[in-house]
Amino acid sequence: MKQPAPGSTRHSVKYRGAVPTPILILTLCMALSASAAEVYTWTDENGVQHFSDTPREGGAMQALEVDEIYRPGSSDAYSAPEAGPEQPPAMPGQTEAETPKTAAEARREAMAKNRSQRREQQAETERLCALHRQRLEQMEPARRVLYTDESGEQVRMDDDQRMALIDESRAYVDQNCKG
């Protein structure tokens, strides 16, 4: 090895047995995280309970086991448990059926109610379409239409009444019935 020139500030130093920097940093981090998990507690002469991560000098204390502790900058600190949609709490004496509904539940119920009403309206429209078509089948080809009045007698319908009923049925079928 070359010797430095006299007066030179450059020195060559060779370390033997030195710990590589990454291992040293890793060891220090593990030591710090292990010590942070220890919590000590004691009660002073005034009855006040104290908590600390460093042991008390010269006094009785108790070490506590801490499973999870908050570490600044950690993303999972105080993470909330995963749960379904939050339900409003029931009032005392209130059954589950009486609990207030969430906005989503109210929308679903309103949609189901609207769907049910549309189905009922559609069924009624189909029933009326069938009745008007039947009326047209009976009245259009016939010149004489007989019906039974309130007293139970058979009466002939005049042509004006018959044509008015035919026009009414045609208009209903054209406006409300498919095919």
Image (tube, rainbow, N blue to C red):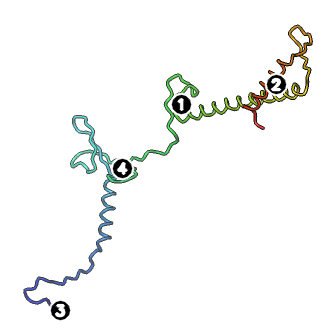
**x, y percentage for residue 47?**
25, 35
Mark 1 residue crowding within 10 angstroms, few (<14) / some (14–19) / many (20+): few
Give the mark nearest the N terminus, 1 or 3: 3
The residue carrying mark 4 is 69
Mark 2 residue crowding within 10 angstroms, few (<14) / some (14–19) / many (20+): many
Q: Amino acid at mark 3?
A: Lys
Relative placement, left or right, of 176 versus 107 is right
Q: Between marks 2 and 3, how big is the CA–CA gap?
A: 123 Å
Q: Nearer the viewer's eye, disc 2 or disc 4?
A: 2
Q: Between marks 2 and 1, how big is the CA–CA gap?
A: 51 Å
Give the mark nearest the N terminus, 2 or 1: 1
Cβ–Cβ under 8 Å for marks 2 and 4: no
Q: Quadrant of residue 151?
A: top right
**x, y percentage for residue 38?**
32, 51
Residue 29 or residue 145, whichever sits in front: 145
Q: Describe the element under mark 2 as helix, strand or loop.
A: helix
Q: Quadrant of residue 21?
A: bottom left
Cβ–Cβ under 8 Å for marks 1 and 3: no
The image shows a total of numbered marks equal to: 4
Q: Between marks 4 and 3, how big is the CA–CA gap?
A: 55 Å
Q: Describe the element under mark 4 as helix, strand or loop.
A: loop
Q: Nearer the viewer's eye, disc 2 or disc 3?
A: 2
Give the mark nearest the N terminus, 2 or 4: 4
Q: Amino acid at mark 1?
A: Lys
The residue carrying mark 1 is 101
Mark 4 residue crowding within 10 angstroms, few (<14) / some (14–19) / many (20+): few
Q: Quadrant of residue 147?
A: top right
Q: Amino acid at mark 2?
A: Ile
**x, y percentage for residue 58?**
21, 48
Residue 98 or residue 112, whichever sits in front: 112
The residue carrying mark 2 is 166
Q: Amino acid at mark 4?
A: Ile
